[in-house]
Each structure stands twice: as structure tokens, then as C-alpha cells.
């Protein structure tokens, strides 16, 4: 995630407060258009592309996408350097792809429920929309001003920050599927009292036996 200041930063910055308002509006707008699982990628692509094109062609139509994009530009303009809005765009869209599933869960759509707003289909369709948008912008515009790079970066961050953790849970639940010469394995982190803190991966060489383990039988002790 890019550096986007908040009140925590210096006691006064309002970037996130301002952006969070349009994030809520756009996320609700997107969720209201979704009825089936397949709608997610379609609506995301249409919405993401409209947002990206606003930065590159200044579409002045009065839409939720334009309002969202224009707010990002206005927040970025405060910093008086080229490309300042790109970090704001990354933050705002990163929040959108989290809030939309949460709204769908509230509305009992697409099999999503509160606290369980991630399914693999949702992850894959979100990534699909981000990739398609990045490629479409890069194809249609000689200079995307970094906008296509933001969509690509959000996709990469989403993999590391969300899907990686989701995969660990699924490995613990149903088993691993990798038996390549090199891989990583789940290892548990515990505190000094033996309480679970979380999980991470350890990079390993396949020795002919360790590939059978879904979680290593050793643990890492972490101290406060």
C-alpha cells in the first residue's frame, strides 16, 4: 500500500477521511449492480476502466466513477508534484475491493456472509478485472501517467496481503498441493505461553518427505 497520510501521521491529515467517503459511495454503487457471482468481474471492469479513463481523458460526465476519480485528483493536487494522485488511487481502490464484498455480504448476495467475504472466485474475478483494466489502459493510451501501473500494483498487493493468508487457511483446512523440488511450507508462530500468534511460510527444498506435511511439526516462538 502506498503512503497515504491520515490523522495518525501528523494529527491533522485528512486524506483518508476524504477518500473513505467516496470509497463508501462507490462500493455501495458497485454492490447494488451485482446479482450473480459473474457480475462482479463485469461491473468491476466497467467501473475501473471509467475511473482510469477519467485520469487520462478528463471525462466530465456526472457519474459515481467520475466523482470518485475527481476526489482522488483533488486530494493529490495538494502535494504539488506530478503523480501525487497515484498513491491516493491505490489506497482508494484497495479499500473498494474490500468494501464491495462486505456490502454484498450484508445484502446476502453471491453466497457471501459477514466475516467470510472472501471466496476464491471473488479473488480471481477481482484480479481479472484489475489485469484487464491495466492492459486496456496501456493499450489505448500511449502515456497512462502511471495509472495502469496502479491497477497492476493493487493486484500484486492483493495477492500478498489477502490471498496469501487465505491460502494458508485452506492448506490447514484441506491440505497442501505442492510437491515441486522447491516450495514453501506453513509454519505456526506462537508466543512464550504457547498461544497461537499466526502463520507464515518457510522456504524449503523438497527432501522427499517434507512435501507430505501441510504444516511443519516445528514452531517459531515470538516474544513481545
Image: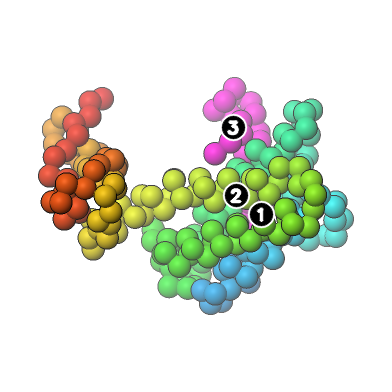
- Label 2: state its secondary structure: helix
Label 1, on which residue? Answer: 134
Number of numbered discs present? 3
Measured from the top left, where is residue 129 in percent x and y?
60, 62
How far is mark 2 from mark 3, CA to CA? 17 Å
Left or right: 67, with 43 as reference point: right
Give the quarter of the image for residue 9.
Answer: top right
**Cα distance, mark 2 to mark 1?**
6 Å
For the magenta stretch, what is the residue range? 1-28
User: In this rendering, is residue 28 above or below 223?
Assistant: below
Whether residue 19 is visible, yes or no, is no
First in residue order: circle 1 vs circle 3: 3
Residue 3 - label? 3
Residue designated by label 2: 152
In the displayed structure, does residue 78 sit left or right of residue 96? Answer: right
Q: Nearer the viewer, residue 39 or 136?
A: 136
Q: Secondary structure at mark 3?
A: loop
Residue under the image location 47 percent in, 73 percent down: 110
For label 1, the SS is helix
Please state if 189 lies on the left or on the right of 138 as rendered: left
Amino acid at each position: 500500500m502506498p503512503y497515504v497520510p491520515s490523522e495518525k501521521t501528523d494529527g491533522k491529515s485528512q486524506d483518508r477521511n476524504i477518500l473513505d467517503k467516496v470509497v463508501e459511495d462507490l462500493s455501495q454503487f458497485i454492490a447494488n449492480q451485482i446479482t450473480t457471482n459473474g457480475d462482479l468481474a463485469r461491473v468491476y471492469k466497467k467501473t475501473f476502466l471509467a475511473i482510469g479513463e477519467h485520469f487520462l481523458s478528463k471525462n466530465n460526465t456526472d457519474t459515481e466513477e467520475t466523482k470518485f476519480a475527481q476526489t482522488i485528483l483533488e486530494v493529490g493536487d495538494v502535494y504539488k508534484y506530478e503523480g501525487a494522485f497515484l498513491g491516493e488511487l491505490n489506497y482508494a481502490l484497495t479499500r473498494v475491493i474490500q468494501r464491495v464484498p462486505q456490502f454484498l455480504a450484508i445484502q446476502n448476495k453471491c453466497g457471501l456472509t459477514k466475516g467470510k467475504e472472501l471466496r476464491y472466485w471473488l479473488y480471481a474475478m477481482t484480479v481479472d478485472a484489475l489485469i484487464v483494466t491495466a492492459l486496456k489502459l496501456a493499450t489505448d493510451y500511449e502515456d497512462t501517467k502511471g495509472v495502469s501501473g496502479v491497477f497492476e500494483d493493487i493486484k500484486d498487493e492483493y495477492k500478498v496481503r489477502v490471498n496469501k493468508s487465505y491460502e494458508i487457511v485452506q492448506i490447514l483446512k484441506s491440505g497442501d498441493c505442492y510437491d515441486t523440488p522447491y516450495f514453501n511450507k506453513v509454519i505456526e508462530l506462537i508466543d512464550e505461553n504457547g498461544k497461537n500468534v499466526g502463520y507464515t511460510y518457510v522456504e524449503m527444498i523438497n527432501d522427499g518427505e517434507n512435501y507430505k506435511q501441510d504444516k511443519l511439526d516445528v514452531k517459531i516462538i515470538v516474544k513481545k
